[in-house]
Amino acid sequence: MIGGKNILVTGGCGFIGSNFIRAALVQKSWPLAKLVNLDALTYAGRQDNLSGLDDPRYVFVHGEIGDVSLTAKILREHQIDTVLNFAAESHVDRSIDRPAPFVQTNVAGVVSLLESALAYYRELPELRRRDFRVVQISTDEVYGSLDANGEAFTEISRYAPSNPYAASKAAADHFAWSFHKTHGLPLMVSHCSNNYGPRQLPEKLIPLMILNAQAGKSLPIYGNGANIRDWIYVDDYAAGLLALMAKGRVGESYHFGGGQEVSNLSVVQKICDVLDQLSPLAPGQNRRELIRFVEDRPGHDFRYAMNTEKARRELGWSPQVGFDEGIRKTIRWYLDHAAWVATAARYDRQIRSN
């Protein structure tokens, strides 16, 4: 690495990708020379997620990871040292209704990106080969479901995806590892638990419940609300990825989770209670009365939990934001960013009508 890292982030206008970019541009762990953001700007990828960003090291390119000629051009032109692939279709409900886009982006797109990265890697001189890395961003959902007393997933847990989204991410991981094992592509895989925080679209549980509750609308919860997720504040995950880039070992996967397992019902109740404090309804009313239980979705995993000991031990990482603090910060962000919320709502209505 001469003069600092040149990073390609794919899907950097999405929720996690945009928060990572903001974190990468201010981190001091290693020198950053250039950060290229390749995004197709689908409904989930929005440039206003990076509004106010004024940094000469940042470059935006509009395009898809499946465009091999474009990704090859970016890698060579910007002399990329590290590729982080955030680009993905990520909403489980949408994958159940229409799995084909998930196969196209999450599987075929990843294979195309891996092909471009491998061709570029083979062209590099030996000294630069040593520093080159590909990081595939995965999810805890590839492991399937845990029962109430099951031990948390580790990096060697068996893949058992339950829904089309999880299956597409599992397939992408398998292709990524095949490029590492067959061709020697220097690769790492990151698995994270449920992220939450600023700039998440209202199709996901926490922002949907915040916005519905603030507006006094119904709060639909699948089944009886007992399903459990481990929640991680998005800034903590970004910090984990920065640590992985600095200290992670090629050929390894790492887990990042908040270590904060909460039932869906408890999440929604917490949102209601915080909003009642910050923005009270009429006297005598509380937002918990808006909760409604609806028919469970097909293949709904009961519980996710990940063992993060490896990341803590090898990378020196640990989550810093507790759920109570994180949910309050998240709610405050949505209350303070009405313009962003209005635009996000229009995108959401548009995609649901298609």
Image (spheres, helix red, strand yellow):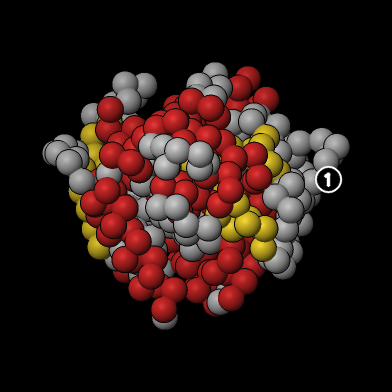
Three-letter amino acid code of the residue under disc 1: Asp
Q: Is residue 218 above or below residue 138?
A: below
Q: Is residue 59 above or below residue 242?
A: below
Please tell me whether mark 1 sits on a helix, a strand or a loop. loop
Q: Is residue 260 left or right of 108 when viewed as pictured?
A: right
Q: Is residue 325 left or right of 82 when viewed as pictured?
A: right
Q: Is residue 120 left or right of 101 when viewed as pictured?
A: left
Q: Residue at x 63, y 57 (%)?
A: 292
Q: Nearer the viewer, residue 298 or 103?
A: 298
Task: Indicate the quadrant containing the N terminus: top left, top right, bottom left or bottom right.
Answer: top left
Residue behind mark 1: 147
Q: Is residue 224 above or below residue 69?
A: above
Q: Is residue 224 left or right of 245 when viewed as pictured?
A: right
* Furthest-bottom residue in this view: 354
Q: Can see residue 174?
A: no
Q: Is residue 155 above or below residue 352?
A: above
Measured as percent of width and height from the top left, residue 246 is found at 44, 27
Q: Quadrant of residue 265?
A: top right
Q: Residue at x 54, y 19 (%)?
A: 316
Q: Residue at x 24, y 39 (%)?
A: 34
Q: Residues within 10 Å of mark 1 (few under 14, many from 20)?
A: few
Measured as percent of width and height from the top left, residue 203 is found at 47, 59
Q: Can see residue 23?
A: yes
Q: How many marks?
A: 1
Q: Residue at x 58, y 66 (%)?
A: 93
Task: Indicate the quadrant containing the C terminus: top left, top right, bottom left or bottom right.
Answer: bottom left
